Image: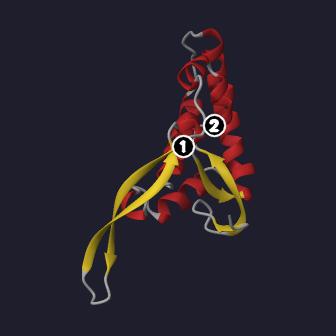
Amino acid sequence: MAKWIDCPFCGLRGERTKEHVWGQWLRNTPGSQMVLKGSTGERISITSPVVELDAVGRYRVQERIYSTAKWLPHVTVPVCKGCNSGWMSQLESTSKSILSPYFANRRSVKVSADKVKDLARWATKTWMAYALQFQSQNNPFSKEDYLTMRLIHRV
C-alpha cells in the first residue's frame, strides 16, 4: 500500500492511514459483539458497473469486481493521518461520550440539540467514509461534499 494519499476529506496529500468505518469502540457494544461473534475480517467480492470511454470515444459499461469486508465493522477506507487522528478522532470521541451511557444502561438518554448535531455529523461522516469504498459513479457524495464535511468540523 502506498504511504501517501490525496485525502478525500481534506484534499491534501498526507500519510495514508485506515479509517475504520464502524468505529472500533462500537465493536465492544453488546449488539456488535452478538453480531460479530465468530466473524473475522473475511472479504467478499462485489461486482460494480463502471462507465468507461473506449478507444473510439464511445461510453461502455464495464463490470468491475472488487473485494470488501463481509461485515461493516471490518471495513476500512484510506484517509490521511491528519484527518484520521484529528477531526475524525475528535468526532468519534464526542459520539462515544454521547452514546456510551445508552449502551451501558440500555435506557434512553436525553441529549441537547448540539449533541444531536454532533451525532448527525458523525453518522454522515461514517456514511461518507463507507461510500469511499465504491467506484466514484456509485458514490452519492461529490468531492466538494467531502471537503465540506471536513470544513464543518474544524478542530
| Quarter that holds the N terminus | bottom right
Label 2 crowd bin: few (<14), some (14–19), many (20+), radius 10 Å: many
* Disc number placed over residue 97 in the picture, else none: none
| 36 or 149: nearer the viewer | 36
Depth check, front residue: 34 or 6: 34
Kindly state the secondary structure of the residue where label 1 is placed. helix
Task: Please give the name of the residue rendered at 59% of the width and 59% of the height, measured from the top-left corner.
Answer: 9
Tag 1 and tag 2, C-beta contact below 8 Å: yes
Q: Residues within 10 Å of mark 1 (few under 14, many from 20)?
A: some
Q: Earlier in the sequence, mark 1 or mark 2?
A: 2
* Residue 119 horizontal/vertical position (percent): 56, 34
CA distance for labels 1 and 2: 9 Å
Q: Quadrant of residue 99?
A: top right
- Can the viewer see residue 155 in this picture? no
Residue 132, x across and y down, in percent: 50, 55
User: Which type of secondary structure does the marked residue at label 2 adopt?
Assistant: loop
Residue 72 horizontal side relative to residue 18, left or right: left
The residue drawn where x is 58% and y is 30% is 39
Q: Is residue 50 above or below residue 87?
A: below
Residue matched to label 1: 126
Report the front residue among 152 and 63: 63
User: Can residue 130 be seen here?
Assistant: yes
Q: Residue at x 26, y 78 (%)?
A: 59
Tell me where residue 15 sits by quadrant: bottom right
- Residue depicted at 73% across the width and 57% down the height: 81
* 51 to the left or right of 99: left
Residue 136 horizontal/vertical position (percent) = 42, 63
> Would you name the residue on which mark 2 appears?
23
**Residue 54 x, y percent position in the rendering:** 31, 83
Q: Amino acid at mark 2?
A: Gly
The kind of residue on which mark 1 rests is Thr
